[in-house]
Image (cartoon, rainbow, N blue to C red):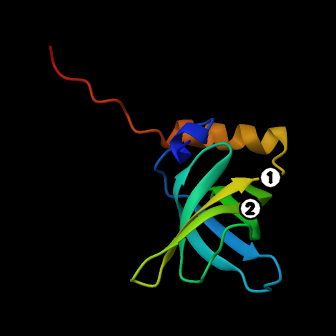
Amino acid sequence: MSTEERRRFERNEVAVCVWLQFHHDRSVQGTTTVDLSPEGARFHASKAVRPGQHVMLYLQLDPVAYTVECKGKVCWANNSPSGLTAFGVRFLDLEDEEHDHIVRALRKYAKPELTLPS
C-alpha cells in the first residue's frame, strides 16, 4: 500500500511557520510546512531525522491569535545530498478545537480553482 493510499486526508501545499523540538533534544528548530493536512505534515530540516522519533510541534496558524501545540511521530524521512532531510510527521494528540483550527486554516490557504472563460 502506498503512502498516498494510507492517508485519510489530502495534503495541501501550504507554508505554515512551525517550531519543532525533538524528544531528548532541548533545541527548537524553526521551519515551515511543505504540506499540511488535519492529521500530519511534511517538513524539511537541516538536522538528521529518522522514522519513529517523537517531536513536539508548534504550528503558527495565525501569526497573532493561534498556535497549535501537539505531539507528533516521524513516519518517514529521506536525506538529500543538499544536507536537508524531508520527513513526514503524524499528529498524535490534537484536541478537537486544534483539529478544527487546522481545517479552517487549510480552507483559508486553499488555492482558488482555475476557471476558464466560456
Dot 2 or dot 1: first in sequence order is: 2
Q: Depth check: give the residue in front, 94 or 53.
A: 53
Residue 75 appears at what percent x and percent y? 66, 59
Residue 70 appears at what percent x and percent y? 80, 58
Side of 61 relative to 46 (left or right) = right
Q: CA distance from mark 2 to mark 1?
A: 7 Å
- Give the quarter of the figure containing the N terminus: top right
Residue appearing at x 46%, y 50% in the figure: 13
Using the rendered view, name the quadrant where residue 90 is placed. Answer: bottom right
Callout 2 environment at 10 Å: few (<14), some (14 to 19), or many (20+)?
A: many
Which disc number belongs to residue 92?
A: 1
Callout 1 environment at 10 Å: few (<14), some (14 to 19), or many (20+)?
A: some
Q: Depth check: give the residue in front, 44 or 49.
A: 49
> Looking at the picture, which amino acid does disc 1 mark?
Leu
Q: Is residue 65 above or below residue 54?
A: above
Q: Secondary structure at mark 1?
A: loop
Side of 78 relative to 53 (left or right) = left
Q: Secondary structure at mark 2?
A: strand
Where is mark 2, residue-wise?
A: 73
